[in-house]
Image: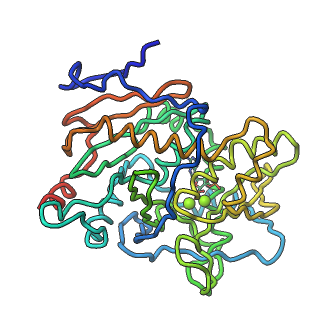
Amino acid sequence: RPNRPQNQSGPSRGQNPHSSLSLSTRRELYERDFPVYKQPVEVGCFSLDSERRFFNDGRQMRYYVEPDRSPNFDLRDGYKDRFIKRDDSVKEKLDHMLRWILANRSKLSARGTTASSCDLDIDFVTWRGHLTKLLTAPYETREGWQLAVTRFRGTLYISEVETEAARRDQENRTERHEEMMYWGYKFEQYTCADTVHGRPDPGGVLNTNEAFCTVVQTRLADHRLLFSGEVDCRDKDPNAPAAPACYIELKTSAEICTPKQRSNFHRFKLLKWWAQSFLPGVPRVVAGFRDEEGVVVALETFPISKISHLIKNEPNCWKPTVCMNFCSDFLSFVKHIATEDNPSVVYLLSWEPRRDVTFSVHRDSPYCFLPHWFVEEMTS
Ligand code: A3P
Ligand code: MG
Ligand code: MG
């Protein structure tokens, strides 16, 4: 089968020297030595308030409060009457990160001097969540993705585009599923305080517009990365290590009762948890295991550095090196194909499970995602 990109369109049709290129996600191709992944450094943070307004500070940071007895958290509480849900039909793309970049340009050291002094010293700008999807792609069998890429002043910006299938799934969610999506946030409310000496307030209103995001810089092989990810909370001990090492990811999961459930937890859930936290250097996940009625019956801490050992006895299991090597090769592929430096050109990379990654090129199209306010301020 020839590796041809689908939906090739726009002025570069037939002229693109890479138009016959595609990238495989087959695991065997990525089983080599673990690539260089530099310890992520936090270069800043930002907050989104109850109305999703941006603040260039950590005002939405929360503090983890270890429950003092065995938990009995009812995750269904408040769903009907104390829940304000973020409007996920509003597509924010990279906007919050771009706002952060404009507010912190001086921190992002410029390469060399005069001529390029307003260019960022960075190859890729994206969300952590987009990178998580890349890390897990060699093992993903259900959900594909589309990533829009624009090269602007030497930096490649990557922003996800919702697939048709994802939009359909979102529209057809059952009431049970809708409610279960609330449970993870409710667990956060039972275990986090707003201030370092405060207590959690599970009786309060839960508003999923609010977020605290870290911005980290790191390098994967020869790719210099700047990305942001939401952080659930931090260790409240004043002697805890500096960010991101003091951060804690909170997760909920169905309680494990059978060997089959344990195996599935290792093979599927721990992959997602590992990828999400390894990327920004968040060292641990605190998991709340809940029953069918949404009551948390046990807590367990998973150090990210121990997850790869935990899964070693699992036959046919995922491997961190495959995840990281695929991501690195994907970024090389993007550098290779996204050659035109132009804020109104989008290279759309598309992937479906059991297929190769393909791409198409779009000029002045609805896929454009760098806003004028960003392009203008970066150009002036
Ligand atoms: P759980 O992952 O504990 O179920 P995060 O864990 O990334 O901080 O996200 C917090 C919660 O948001 C999740 O908690 C889940 O309830 C909800 N959530 C996050 N991503 C989701 C997705 N893709 N689909 C549905 N719910 C999601
Ligand atoms: Mg979170
Ligand atoms: Mg979480």
Q: Which of the 4 image quadrants contains residue 289?
A: bottom right
Q: Residue at x 70, y 57 (%)?
A: 76
Q: Residue at x 61, y 36 (%)?
A: 139
Q: Residue 109: where, in percent of width, then height? A: 28, 68
Q: Which of the 4 image quadrants contains residue 45?
A: bottom left
Q: Is residue 248 visible?
A: yes
Q: Residue at x 21, y 22 (%)?
A: 15
Tell me if 261 is positioned left or right of 285 in this view.
Answer: right
Of residues 55 and 207, the one nearer the viewer is 55
Q: Residue 13: where, in percent of width, then height? A: 23, 21
Position above or below: 33 against 347 = below
Of residues 87 and 215, the one nearer the viewer is 215
Q: Residue 307: where, in percent of width, then height? A: 71, 55
Q: Residue 141: where, in percent of width, then height? A: 61, 31
Of residues 86 and 325, the one nearer the viewer is 325
Q: Is residue 164 visible?
A: no
